Image (spheres, helix red, strand yellow):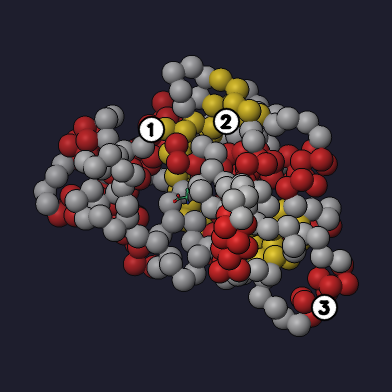
Amino acid sequence: MPATPGQRPVFRFAPSPNGLLHLGHALSAVLNHDMAQASGGRFLLRIEDIDGARCTPKYEAAIYRDLAWLGLRWEEPVRRQSQHFADYAAALERLKEMDLVYPAFMTRGEVKSIVAAHGAQGRYWPRDPDGSPHYPGEDRERSPAERRRLLADGVRHAWRLDMARALTLVGKPLNWQETGGADAKTERADPSAWGDVVLSRSDAPSSYHLSVVVDDALQGITHVVRGLDLFHATSVHRLLQELLGLPEPIYHHHRLVLGVDGRKLSKSERSTGLASLREAGVSTAEIRRRIGL
Ligand code: GLU
């Protein structure tokens, strides 16, 4: 069910502190903030730092500095995902009890060579909307005894969703309410396009998909406003919400700010980084103009 009418809207900006914010983040943050203000809603900031190898306190501090410079105010305390791994583990546990996840033991290299061997025979291998090959079926097909043995041997593994099983259990088409286009409309979710997505990584005790869905529910987020680069991920999020019995926010996927070369901005590019623009004396009014607000 979409968010209950009459409920006070709750928006969030949810950056990962694995690099410096750029103009694209500014668009997302300011849009969330402005939409919250316009609707008498709340604006939350969430730090998505489950990747302990790439996220740093330095980048987190830079997020607070850049957003404050843009004139944004958010509620405290800020939720930092690295402090809530138990919440994601509990959600994973529920999916394990429902027999919808399995331990996935293949390395990226192993997947790559299986896919390459397939391709060499001129055979098709499905890819997800981000272009990564679907995970091969071998681990999904293992017997419970074999799984137990590999786990007991301490073989490194992720946990993946058995997509076909999950879809069978849900047993109905999934949709979401999208307000990002010219007119609000219902989008059809297509989770199967992703194959068996990772819900807990081998190098982190959760995944983006699982933690974002758990947190949006725990924080009572009614409106998810984020870039179009995450449009297709919403299909996975809707499926997880359905499996875990979580409420369904309204989604608004906004246009992306592109570089002069027409490509998506990167966190390592200085010319569009908020900190370097600030240091160069660019005003926040100019930032708003550059992001088209
Ligand atoms: N943490 C994600 C990112 O920085 C955004 C998550 C979301 O808005 O759903 O790309």
Residue at the (80%, 47%) spot, across then down: 165
89 and 196: which one is in front?
A: 196
**Which residue is situated farthest in the bottom direction here?**
153
Q: Is mark 3 within 8 Å of ligand 1?
A: no
**Which residue is situated farthest in the left direction here?**
281
Where does label 2 land, which residue? 250
In percent of width and height, residue 153 lies at 76, 82
Q: Is residue 191 above or below residue 14?
A: above
Pick the quarter of the image with the C terminus: top left
**Residue kind at label 1, given as amino acid type:** Arg
Residue at the (28%, 39%) spot, across then down: 262
- Dot 2 falls on a residue whose secondary structure is strand
Q: Can you see residue 85?
A: no
Q: Is residue 284 above or below residue 16?
A: above
Which disc is residue 255 wearing? 1
Where does label 3 land, which residue? 149
